[in-house]
Amino acid sequence: MENTNLEAHPGVVTPKDIRGAMWRHIITLQWSWNYERMQALGYLWSMLPILKKVYPEKEALIAAMKRHLSFYNTNPQIGSPPIFGATVALEEQKYGDAVDSLKIGLMGPFAGIGDTLQGVLVRPLVAVFAASLGLAGNWAGAAIMFLLGVVWSVLMIPLFYMGYRQGTGLVDEVTGGGLIDRVTNIATIFGVMVVGGFVPSIMSKLTSPLTFHKTVEIAGKATTQTLSLQTILNQILPAIFPILTVGLAYWLVKRWKISPVWILLILVVVAFGTSAIGLL
């Protein structure tokens, strides 16, 4: 009688094996991150349930494990799940060379797409909104950031299965038609617009306390009037000091290539200096 127990068959990868590999990848990919091979060890650990089924012989299994210990690093939430899904599908068919080529060829492009969507588009937008709530004393700001992390984790599941279904066709989906450039450009433009729109509200307390006193004659009586510099500036260009601060940071980055850490230190010095003389 034919054996229908796929779990016991050493050469058959079952849906349970695929799900196990996927959850390993989602949960543990970054746990063993290191400076030498970055995500490689986590990738191997995730792939191990598949490799044990496909390569039951000890020598073949060791060789496959060594292949997956090569350098690997990409965006963990958006970039790696589809790559991992595609390589799982290829490992099932023992396409070892194709697996290595796919990982090397796609980890860079997917890192660009994932980092742009997360770091330029979604995360700044949500973080600025959450920060504005936090500054107002609203606990929802922290909850929003927590929920964002949950969303990224849940999104990894359909991305994995998308890669698993595509297999080698994933290369054409990513590199064909200039997808990377389009995603990067759109996300960058939209992200800068959104963050720029939040600048006045986030830095609303950056104002000038300077006042001027002027004596005028009203109905034959000398009267002293107080003029606020900030009130005058608001009539000319509202939020001028937040705009100038952001412009200074942008100029330092673009013109002098100064790192963000040094820019923060410069802004701290400027803040203390202008506060000491009573300008801001």
Image: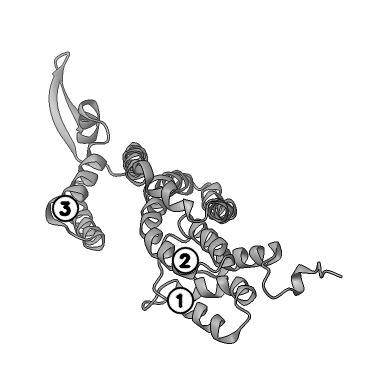
Please tell me which residue lies in front, 30 or 149. 30
Can you identify the residue that label 1 sits on? Answer: 67
Residue 104, horizontal then vertical, whole percent: 38, 65
Residue 204, horizontal then vertical, whole percent: 33, 41
Outermost residue on the right side: it is 1
Going by the image, does 178 lie left or right of 92? Answer: left
Amino acid found under the numbered disc labelled 1: Arg
Circle 2 packing at 10 Å, graded few (<14), some (14-19), many (20+), is: many
Circle 3 packing at 10 Å, graded few (<14), some (14-19), many (20+), is: some
Amino acid found under the numbered disc labelled 3: Leu
Outermost residue on the bottom side: it is 59
Does the image show residue 237? Answer: yes
Mark 1 or mark 2: which comes first in sequence?
A: 1
Can you identify the residue that label 2 sits on? Answer: 99
Can you identify the residue that label 3 sits on? Answer: 252
Asked whether the residues under the numbered discs 1 and 2 touch, taking CB atoms below 8 Å apart as contact, a structural biologist would say yes
Amino acid found under the numbered disc labelled 2: Val
Query: Which mark is in front, 2 or 3?
Result: 2
Does the image show residue 204? Answer: no
Q: Residue at x 47, y 66 (%)?
A: 99
Residue 125: numbered disc: none
Asked whether the residues under the numbered discs 1 and 3 touch, taking CB atoms below 8 Å apart as contact, a structural biologist would say no
Mark 2 or mark 3: which comes first in sequence?
A: 2
Outermost residue on the front side: it is 1
Please tell me which residue lies in front, 239 or 123. 123
Outermost residue on the top side: it is 219
Mark 1 or mark 3: which comes first in sequence?
A: 1
Residue 65, horizontal then vertical, whole percent: 51, 79
Please tell me which residue lies in front, 187 or 193. 187
> In this rendering, is residue 112 above or below 33?
above
